[in-house]
Amino acid sequence: MTTIILLTDTCASGLEELQSLKKLILESIDQFKECCASLSTSKSAQDLQGSLWIEIQNRTPKVEHETQLPPKLKEFKVLSKCVKDVENGDDLRAIELAIQTNPKDTAAQKQLLEKAKSLMEKYAEEISGRVNSPELTRTVVEICHLGNNSFRKVYDTLWDEKIVSAEDLALQAYALLADAMKVLAKSAKIQKQPVSDLVELYVQAATVKPEFDRIMAEVEREFALRTEKDLTLSVCSTLKKTTRMAEKSQLKASEPGDVSGVKDIVRAMMTGRSMEEVNVVIEIMIKMHQDGKLEIVRVKDRFLEAPSSGGWRDIMVNICLTVGSVQHVAEIQIVHHSMLNARKGLDGHIVYNVVRNGLEMLAMRRGSIDVTALVDFENNVEQPRFAKWYSQAPAGEWEGVVSSNAQDHVWEIDLAILDPKLEVRHRLPHLRKLAIPPTIPQLTATYTKQVTYFFCSLGAF
């Protein structure tokens, strides 16, 4: 049996000592996992491993910044608060970890089933009351504007001035590679998870997790061979919390409680120092798809096609892995180092959770979240200049919106009403046509670039 490294009582006083201590702790955790793996049939070893992860989580400092939020954001209650009593401290997480350690643990599965029923009931009741509020559209538009405004300025400046201006050729190559992945995804045999039951899906995720970790390590090795550099790879050591799975099943599923659309229970993040390195990762994944090691089933291009409302950009790739008779869809997020660094500096996790919940409920109520992007034309949410704005009326009835579809996607806007001087940098994800004011004799190069950049997915080229 491997001997666990014992940490000394010596207090680390400098940066080098802290780095050494961090390395020592990680090595100790790895050795602990190896010991538990060698005793995989021992229930005591499984319980001990589960208790370690809980202890680590409990001892990790939780920095709260809610007091610094604007009042509207602070007042908005995230949905997960309605199930705190069901989580019962660390009880639910311990059950989840027991299944991750041993997917065949039927006792833990039974416990999770009971918890899942309570989670579903709590979320269904909370969401029903919130989604039917007559002020939902106005509230969500306002919190999105408050939450995204500062982030967008940072991300847009970084993207425009550092990445686009310096990595033009790599962006062109990226666009082609992203399209190639989308072609592969179109022929995927599986588009969502093969099961809809929360417990069954969680067990499948636990079964596939070791294979996913192995595949990620293979990508890491191949990247080093191709570039002679190390890939920054972050593989989540634990599965996604079942509270979020239950929440998604009530917000996004066609049938309440159906979790087959949850594709990020098993997940990882890969960070490229440049778009060129991002492209290398994509090339490796395409090759692994062609070799049958994984199947690319879905691609969400947020670098060029659909940046978040807050300006964040990355590419999300869902892959299907097969272990024996089990198939499972996992998620890989590929990001640019500069974007990730900017996000760390913004410290926006609480804001993200608030905005995400708001957008999900709005999409459930209206069919889409396009109307939140209209705030670029009128940010006075309480007293807008334009008729029917921020009401529950369909987007097509809002003044200046020429056409929309049944899903509330905004297809055409009249800039003579909304932006007669062409001053707004707007980003409507489903826009098909712009009615340019006749008073504008000639479009500026800057505005033309903006239109092609955000609505034609042509990037900087």
Image (tube, grey):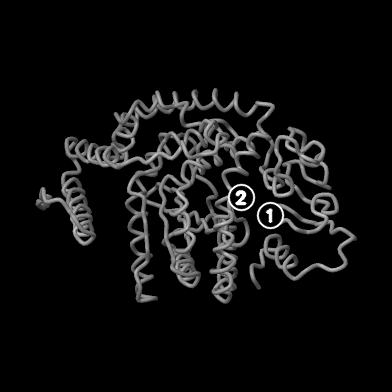
Q: Residues within 10 Å of mark 2 (few under 14, many from 20)?
A: many
Q: Residues within 10 Å of mark 1 (few under 14, many from 20)?
A: many
Give whichever of 71, 247 is nearer the camera. 71
* Quadrant in the rendering for residue 256: top right
Rendered view: 325 above or below 271: above
Q: According to the image, label 1 marks what residue?
A: 427
Residue 213: x and y, percent? 34, 55
Rendered view: 96 above or below 35: above
Rendered view: 176 above or below 11: below
**Nearest to N terminus: mark 1 or mark 2:** 2
Q: According to the image, label 2 marks what residue?
A: 309
Give whichever of 27, 166 is nearer the camera. 166
Residue 373: x and y, percent? 68, 47
Q: Which mark is residue 461?
A: none
As drawn, the residue found furthest toward the right would be 438
- At mark 2, the secondary structure is loop
Give whichever of 184, 217 is nearer the camera. 217
Residue under the image location 40 percent in, 46 percent down: 326
- The amino acid sitting under disc 2 is Ser
Relative placement, left or right, of 79 versus 266 is right
For the residues labelled 1 and 2, the Cα–Cα distance comes to 8 Å
Give whichever of 339, 41 is nearer the camera. 339
* Quadrant in the rendering for residue 453: bottom right
- The amino acid sitting under disc 1 is Arg
Residue 47: x and y, percent? 21, 35
Relative placement, left or right, of 287 versus 110 is right
Relative placement, left or right, of 235 versus 343 is left
**In the rendered structure, are the residues bearing label 1 and label 2 in contact, judged by CB atoms less than 8 Å apart?**
yes
